Image (cartoon, rainbow, N blue to C red):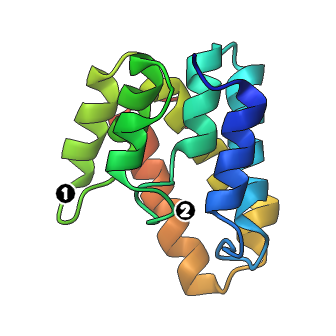
Amino acid sequence: MTLTPDEVEAIARSAHEGQTDKSGRPYAEHLAAVAGGVRARGGDEHQIAAAWLHDAIEDDALTEQWLQEAALSRRTKDIVLAMTKRPGESPEEYAARILATPGARLVKESDLAHNSDPARLAVLDEPTRVRLTEKYARMRALLGLEP
């Protein structure tokens, strides 16, 4: 039996409980925005589930073992693993893995769209805003996404 979308959302919200983004907002707001963005871009249920979980392993909210044992589709698991940055990994290697994983590019596109939202960036200090804007633009270019 595969987890329902509501169950995946509840797990993600619980796993990231108490975490905030760079602007101090509850991290679950980012997850909800990414999942909503995937839905709006025509993503399927596997991609939406992956959107809720896309930062869980990287942020140590859940373990890779949990993911492997979870009642999720192989497609969802593969997308989450593709979205998980590894220590010392170059942006080029990260982008190549995303591009090689069916469905992951759409999830990353939604993630970048929310991360690049001018309203979110506006509350950050200038050096952070500039650094992140450049980082997100570079990743969009590596993934072949429109600027």
Q: Residues within 10 Å of mark 1 (few under 14, many from 20)?
A: few
Q: Position of residue 27 (x, y in %)?
A: 70, 64
Q: Is residue 48 visible?
A: yes
Q: Compared to 130, does 68 lie above or below? A: above
Q: Compared to 137, does 110 lie above or below? A: above
Q: Amino acid at mark 2?
A: Thr
Q: Nearer the viewer, residue 121 or 61?
A: 61
Rendered residue at 47%/35% (across/down):
70
- Count of marks, rendered view: 2
Q: Residues within 10 Å of mark 2 (few under 14, many from 20)?
A: some
Is residue 111 toward the left or the right of residue 83 in the image?
right
SS at circle 2: helix
Q: Nearer the viewer, residue 62 or 122?
A: 62
Q: Is residue 141 visible?
A: no
SS at circle 1: loop
Q: Amino acid at mark 1?
A: Glu
Is residue 147 toward the left or the right of residue 43 in the image?
left
Rendered residue at 75%/79% (across/down):
24
> Disc 2 marks which residue?
133
- The first of marks 2 and 1 along the sequence is 1
Rendered residue at 63%/41% (across/down):
52
Disc number placed over residue 140 in the picture, else none: none
Is residue 105 toward the left or the right of residue 112 in the image?
left
Residue that lies at the very extreme toward the front in this rendered image: 1
Q: Are the residues flagged by discs 2 and 1 in contact, CB closer than 8 Å?
A: no
Disc number placed over residue 89 in the picture, else none: 1
Q: Position of residue 145 (x, y in %)?
A: 48, 29
